[in-house]
């Protein structure tokens, strides 16, 4: 079930609370360049300008940036390029990293964070001998944001530490991001441009890290794997205007999330940890029945049992506008009461 993702929950007529992608249309300064790039489709894509733009965004040289066809491709490249003897994946988290490692023939050790600790990172639980460690921050599906100092403490010579920051731009100011850190040995940061900007269908992400590691990943990347429209999106999303807009969106999102969390807790629903991103994780009794009943009443939510460390009583809920959240909580309360 590692390959199961939220889009599989969606069907016509359902309110989508299963996919963590912002649903608003991209602004004109982003949609315009994407549309204009269609005139250049006869030429092979050249990633140089987009790579430089992303590098400048994170105060890095271009050789420390690799553009990918969505963050998911980065995990495949990692599994192909690296030969870890003792890889560790910290769960619950996005399952593609483990799936890619297993597909490439790497045995994986799981470290499962505890509900009792709010699913917060405990660095002491990561085996010292691990030579590859993968962690999400903020973590999907728990919505927990780990302290940058704790994540940085995982790095050391002889170990590759991969931090999935696909949802980092949902946090106002990105205070716990390591994307601009160049002093940590073996650090790779994976980012996505598809969540906040509603570009899941375009597939654009990138990896940041030491040149030697980036070069190893690049050797395994297919030629021209990032399309011309995706490169146009990367350039636009790396601009100062985009960064400022991201922060505005993240601030508004935080208010919408706090509204949802308050409504859930007022209804007696258990919310995991301290949610920080664009989704929340809840625990209910008889979760499979609840999920099916919600679906019958028009709401698609993300099942939890496909995430290692969770089970069917866990459900992930995407943050939407307050009206949608209120309607959802009302239906959920009815289902729980029934």
Image (cartoon, rainbow, N blue to C red):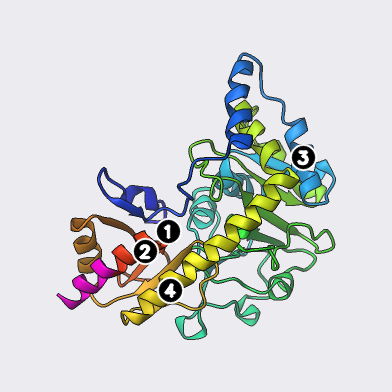
Distance from disc 1 to disc 2, alpha carbons, whole Å, reads: 6 Å
Q: Which residue is mark 1?
A: 321
Local SS, label 3? helix
Name which residue lies at 62% across and 23% down.
Answer: 37
Mark 2 secondary-structure assignment: helix
Taking the view exactly as shown, the residue that stands out farthest to the bottom is 116
How much space separates mark 3 and mark 1, taking CA atoms? 32 Å
Q: Nearer the viewer, residue 11 or 239?
A: 239
Q: Residue at x 45, y 81 (%)?
A: 115
User: Are circles 3 and 1 on residues that touch, CB within 8 Å?
Assistant: no
Q: Position of residue 54 (x, y in %)?
A: 74, 43
User: Mark 3 or 1 closer to N-term?
Assistant: 3
Q: Which residue is mark 2?
A: 325
**What segment carries the magenta color?**
330-338
Q: Is residue 127 left or right of residue 320?
A: right
Say if mark 1 contacts mark 2, CB within 8 Å. Answer: yes
């Amino acid at each position: 079930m590692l390959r199961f993702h939220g889009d599989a929950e969606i069907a016509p007529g359902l309110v989508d609370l299963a996919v963590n992608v912002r649903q608003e249309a991209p602004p004109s300064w982003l949609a315009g360049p994407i549309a204009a790039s269609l005139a250049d489709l006869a030429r092979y894509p050249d990633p140089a300008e987009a790579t430089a733009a992303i590098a400048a965004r994170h105060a890095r040289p271009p050789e420390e940036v690799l553009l990918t066809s969505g963050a998911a491709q980065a995990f495949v490249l990692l599994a192909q390029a690296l030969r870890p003897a003792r890889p560790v994946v910290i769960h619950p988290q996005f399952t593609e990293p483990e799936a890619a490692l297993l597909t490439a023939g790497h045995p994986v050790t799981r470290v499962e964070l505890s509900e009792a600790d709010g699913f917060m990172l405990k660095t002491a639980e990561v085996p010292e001998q691990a030579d590859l460690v993968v962690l999400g921050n903020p973590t999907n599906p728990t919505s927990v944001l780990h302290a940058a100092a704790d994540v940085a403490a995982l790095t050391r010579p002889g170990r590759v530490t991969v931090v999935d920051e696909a949802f980092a731009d949902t946090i106002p100011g990105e205070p716990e991001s390591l994307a601009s850190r160049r002093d940590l040995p073996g650090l790779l940061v994976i980012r996505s441009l598809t969540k906040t900007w509603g570009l899941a269908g375009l597939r654009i992400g990138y990896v940041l890290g030491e040149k030697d590691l980036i070069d190893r990943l690049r050797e395994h990347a297919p030629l021209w794997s990032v399309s011309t429209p995706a490169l146009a999106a990367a350039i636009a999303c790396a601009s100062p205007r985009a960064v400022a807009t991201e922060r505005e969106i993240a601030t508004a999102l935080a208010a919408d999330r706090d509204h949802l969390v308050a409504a859930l807790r007022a209804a007696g629903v258990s919310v995991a940890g301290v949610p920080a991103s664009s989704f929340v994780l809840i625990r209910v009794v008889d979760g499979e029945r609840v999920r099916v009943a919600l679906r019958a009443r028009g709401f698609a939510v993300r099942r939890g049992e496909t995430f290692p460390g969770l089970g069917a009583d866990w459900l992930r809920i995407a943050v939407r506008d307050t009206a949608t959240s209120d309607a959802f909580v009302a239906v959920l309360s009815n289902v729980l009461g029934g």
